[in-house]
Each structure stands twice: as structure tokens, then as C-alpha cells.
């Protein structure tokens, strides 16, 4: 009998367990047979509500979650399909969504996705036509079409959040984007992987303060030395394993693999019961690659220790007394002082003023004068733009004024649909490898970009600009429509005043 994930996760009396499967690069063989065997054992066990299947994790090619998921789905196990924005443009994504609907697999985890990895002949071209917020919006719009066509079942779309961020800017950007995802129609939340109970609590507190009550699942991982090392070194975007935990895992597995595995199962079970005690609706188990046996052991151990969950909390604070970690709530004044101005040199402060604070002030003033439709001269600019459009002279504005100013200041990509006003006058096209217009991805680490670790995340820079002028709370508030590719290589200034760009639908 098929267990319906959407029904079970929506039941507040139910504690849900899902299991993540990671397909390999082959279309068949032992690795795929192993995953199907794990799914079958999960179904027979009866405690797993659904398996989720990753979508080219790490940006590297693997078997499509759609085809593997469908084989598992037909055997009776409900499936959550990971759906990323990295590899397909909006046309391809809509087509894929319709395919999934036709196959009956409507549990979707909508993700922006890791950056592109290597495929045939080298690195793949990153698409990122949408971000996770826009993908969620697309799926919500398709719901109406499904209903109109006579299909009574709509998509059950979930989203991810990475609460284990160390800086103020990254933390607030993650929560701001989560709010957008929920506002766009996400029905459940799965966290990234981390081992900080205060951060787990913080996520629930944030949702409570916002008056949002989505079912939230916490990620639990069977941590091996190999996976712990990758996460500790930042090779798994959004996941966090502290140095102290990494050293501990290496020591545990250094004795014998059997004792290391036993300890890993115990750690996963402890985190699972803590999450249940904190009010999480379920857990999402990862790191299972060989058999279902370890999953059964984790769940059995959880049953044994569930009533004593509070005794294990201290084990998951990971003892980082000197670490600079920002918390929205339950702040430690001494630690907050360390987070503040410590180790920020005079040279860095001067650089920030020159590259962020002063340009922000200048661009903000210029925007009010020239690109505010309520400004006194706005009608004049509109008539001028109309004249240039009618006489086919709009390209002159781009050539003589726009490009000479915007390219040096913003590394302008000539998209013709400028979105700098949503990002504290930084360009999301040139500043972010994933072109995110609706908030930071989950891959940044200590304020630096997932793709270019030597660069600060553009959303972190934007928060610094806004906080400097007392507007930090406005970061990412706008739900920004997708880029209009039909305007590429045209004048964004003329497009704005003629109401042709994405801002025509914004207040």
C-alpha cells in the first residue's frame, strides 16, 4: 500500500522519516540495483514515508531522479524528486514538471542547485534561468492548469534552508529567502546538514515569530570520515561539520570501521530524537549508500532513547567557544562582541567604504533622480524614451551613456532588464555565478561565494551596504520576476521608462 508523503507530513501527530538516495553516473548495474534494494527494504520496513532522489548532486552528471524515482514509485514507495535550476532553462523546467505530473510524481524539492560540475568534454554550462523561489512559483502556477485539466492532485512542493551560517548577513539572507519560498507556495521545509542545536532552534523560532507553521524536517546524516572531511572542507555547499566534530569522527573510525559505524548510527539517532523534541515534524536521513540496515539501526536506537533527548543536546553544541557564529536569538553578549569588529583591519574598512558604502550612496541617489517613476521628471524621461524607441535610436543611450557608466561600476552584462535596485545596487548577473535575483543560495561559506571562494557573496555585500544606512531589514524583500531574455543587449534605461522590463509588474 502506497504511503502518501504529503498526507503524513501534513499530519501534526505524525513524525515523518524520509531517506535520501544518490544515483550514480551509470544507467544500470550494481549501484542502481543497490539503491532500488534500499528503497524496497525501506518500503517493507514500514517506517519510511518517502525516499528522495538527488538531481545531479555537486553539478555532476548522474542518472535522472525522474526515471529511477518512477521505478521505485511503481513499486509502492512514495518519492520526492529533487528539482534544480542549474541544468535547464525555464522552458525545459516547465516541460520536466509536466512530465513528472504525468508520471504521478508530484512531491518536489525545489532547489537552486549546486554549481555546474564536469561532464563530457569538461565543465557544463550553468543555466540558472530561475532560482528556487521562481521554480516554486512556476510549480504553483502549474497547479491551476492541472486542476483545470481534470487532474485532482497538484504538486506538493518543498524547499530547503541552510540555517548553519556563521555570519549575520548569510543567516538573515537565508531566513529572508525561506520566507519568500513559503510565500511562493512551498508546503514543507528540509534543512541542510549541520550539528548546532542552537541553529536548529533558531529556525523554529524564526518561523514562529513570522507566524508560519510549515512542517519542517531536519537533515540527519550517517557521518563517515570521507563525508565528514568533504563537509568540513566546504565541498558540500550548505552543509557544516565543525573542526571539532571532524577530528572526533576521524578518531572514532580510526579504531575499527565497525566501532566507527556504531558511533555514527548513535550520533544520527541522538540528533534525530533532539529534532523530534524541538518540534520538528520529521527527519531526512542521508549518507546511506550500501544497505537499509543502518537506517533500521538508527530508527531502533531512536526508539530506545527518545524520552531522554534533552540529555544529548550538549553533544551537539560542538564546543566552539572562540568561534564567531551569529545567532538571531539566544545571543551571548561576549560572543557577539567577538563577532562584531574583531580583526576587521583599517585597510578592510577603507576598502568597504570605497567599494560598497560610497558607491551605494551615489547609485541610490542617481536612481531616485533618474529611475523613480514618481519623480518630477519621470514623465519627461518617459517621453524621451518613447522618442528614442520610435526613431530606433535607443541603442545610442546604451552605447554613449549606459555602457560607459555601468560596465566599469557594475560589470554590467547588458541584460536589458536591470535588477540592481533589488540588490543594493549590485548586479546579480555579474556578481552572482547563479544569477540569483531572489536571495542568496545556500552555498556560501563564512561570507564567501560557493563558486569563487576568494570573493564575498554578493548578497553578503548587499547586506553590508544596506545595514550601513540602517536598511538591513529590507534585503531581498521584493519578489523579483525572472529575467526577460527578450530584452538582452538592449538599453535597460529605455526599457525601464517604457515599462518593458520586469519592473512593470512591481510597485
Image (spheres, helix red, strand yellow):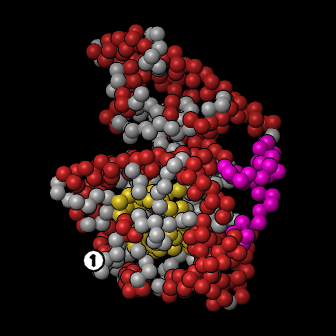
Residue 202 appears in the figure:
yes
**Which residues are drawn in magenta?**
314-343
The residue lying toward the viewer, choosing from 203 and 450, is 203
User: Where is residue 426 drawn, in percent x and y?
Assistant: 55, 34
Q: Is residue 76 above or below residue 135?
A: below
Quadrant (top left/top right/bottom left/bottom right) for the N terminus: bottom left
Judged left or right of residue 316, residue 390 is left
The relative height of residue 271 versus residue 181 in the rendered view (above or below) is below
Of 457 and 214, the residue lying toward us: 214
For the residue carrying disc 1, how many other residues have a C-alpha within 10 Å: few (<14), some (14-19), or many (20+)?
A: few
Quadrant in the rendering for residue 107 = bottom left
Q: How many labels does the image show?
A: 1
Q: Does the magenta stretch include residue 499?
A: no
- Residue nearer the viewer, 427 or 331: 331
- Which percent across, then down, holds residue 445? 63, 54
Instruction: Estimate the x, y position of residue 90 in percent, counting from the top left.
Output: 33, 48
**Can you identify the residue that label 1 sits on?**
74
Amino acid at each position: 500500500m502506497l504511503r502518501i508523503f504529503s498526507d503524513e507530513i501534513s499530519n501534526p501527530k505524525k513524525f515523518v522519516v524520509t531517506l535520501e538516495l544518490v544515483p550514480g553516473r551509470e544507467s544500470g548495474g550494481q549501484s542502481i540495483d543497490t539503491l532500488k534494494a534500499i528503497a524496497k527494504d525501506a518500503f517493507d520496513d514500514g517506517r519510511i514515508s518517502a525516499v528522495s532522489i538527488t538531481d545531479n548532486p555537486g553539478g555532476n552528471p548522474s542518472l535522472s531522479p525522474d526515471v529511477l524515482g518512477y521505478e521505485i514509485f511503481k513499486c509502492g514507495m512514495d518519492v520526492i524528486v529533487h528539482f534544480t535550476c542549474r541544468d535547464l532553462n525555464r522552458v525545459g523546467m516547465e516541460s520536466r514538471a509536466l512530465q513528472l505530473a504525468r508520471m504521478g510524481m508530484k512531491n518536489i524539492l525545489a532547489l537552486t542547485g549546486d554549481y555546474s560540475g564536469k561532464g563530457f568534454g569538461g565543465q557544463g554550462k550553468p543555466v540558472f534561468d530561475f532560482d528556487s523561489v521562481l521554480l516554486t512559483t512556476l510549480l504553483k502556477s502549474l497547479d491551476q492548469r492541472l486542476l483545470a485539466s481534470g487532474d485532482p492532485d497538484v504538486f506538493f512542493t518543498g524547499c530547503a534552508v541552510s540555517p548553519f551560517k556563521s555570519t549575520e548577513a548569510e543567516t538573515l539572507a537565508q531566513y529572508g529567502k525561506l520566507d519568500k519560498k513559503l510565500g511562493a507556495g512551498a508546503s514543507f521545509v528540509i534543512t541542510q546538514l549541520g550539528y548546532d542545536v542552537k541553529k536548529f532552534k533558531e529556525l523554529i523560532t524564526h518561523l514562529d515569530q513570522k507566524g508560519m507553521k510549515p512542517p519542517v524536517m531536519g537533515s540527519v546524516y550517517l557521518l563517515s570520515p570521507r563525508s565528514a572531511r568533504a563537509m568540513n572542507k566546504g565541498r558540500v555547499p550548505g552543509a557544516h561539520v565543525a573542526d571539532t566534530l571532524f577530528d572526533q569522527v576521524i578518531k572514532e573510525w580510526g579504531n575499527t570501521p565497525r566501532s566507527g559505524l556504531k558511533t555514527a548510527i548513535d550520533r544520527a539517532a541522538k540528533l534525530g530524537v533532539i529534532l523530534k523534541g524541538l518540534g520538528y515534524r520529521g527527519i531526512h536521513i542521508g549518507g546511506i549508500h550500501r544497505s537499509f540496515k543502518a537506517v533500521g539501526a538508527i530508527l531502533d536506537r531512536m526508539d530506545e532513547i527518545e524520552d531522554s533527548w534533552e540529555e544529548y543536546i550538549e553533544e551537539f553544541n560542538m564546543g566552539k567557544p572562540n568561534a564567531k557564529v551569529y545567532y538571531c536569538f539566544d545571543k551571548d553578549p561576549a560572543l557577539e562582541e567577538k563577532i562584531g569588529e574583531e580583526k576587521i583591519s583599517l585597510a578592510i574598512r577603507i576598502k568597504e567604504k570605497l567599494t560598497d558604502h560610497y558607491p551605494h550612496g551615489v547609485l541610490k541617489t542617481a536612481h531616485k533622480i533618474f529611475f523613480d517613476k514618481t519623480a518630477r521628471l519621470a514623465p519627461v524621461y518617459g517621453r524621451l524614451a518613447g522618442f528614442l524607441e520610435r526613431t530606433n535610436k535607443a541603442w545610442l543611450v546604451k552605447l554613449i551613456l549606459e555602457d560607459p557608466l555601468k560596465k566599469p561600476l557594475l560589470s554590467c552584462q547588458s541584460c536589458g532588464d536591470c535588477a540592481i535596485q533589488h540588490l543594493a545596487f549590485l548586479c546579480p548577473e555579474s556578481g552572482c555565478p547563479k544569477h540569483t535575483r531572489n536571495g542568496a543560495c545556500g552555498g556560501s561559506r563564512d561570507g564567501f561565494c560557493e563558486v569563487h571562494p576568494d570573493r564575498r557573496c554578493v548578497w553578503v555585500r548587499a547586506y553590508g551596504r544596506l545595514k550601513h544606512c540602517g536598511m538591513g531589514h529590507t534585503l531581498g524583500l521584493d519578489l523579483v520576476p525572472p529575467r526577460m531574455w527578450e530584452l538582452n543587449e538592449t538599453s535597460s534605461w529605455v526599457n525601464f521608462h517604457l515599462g518593458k522590463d520586469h519592473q512593470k509588474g512591481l510597485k
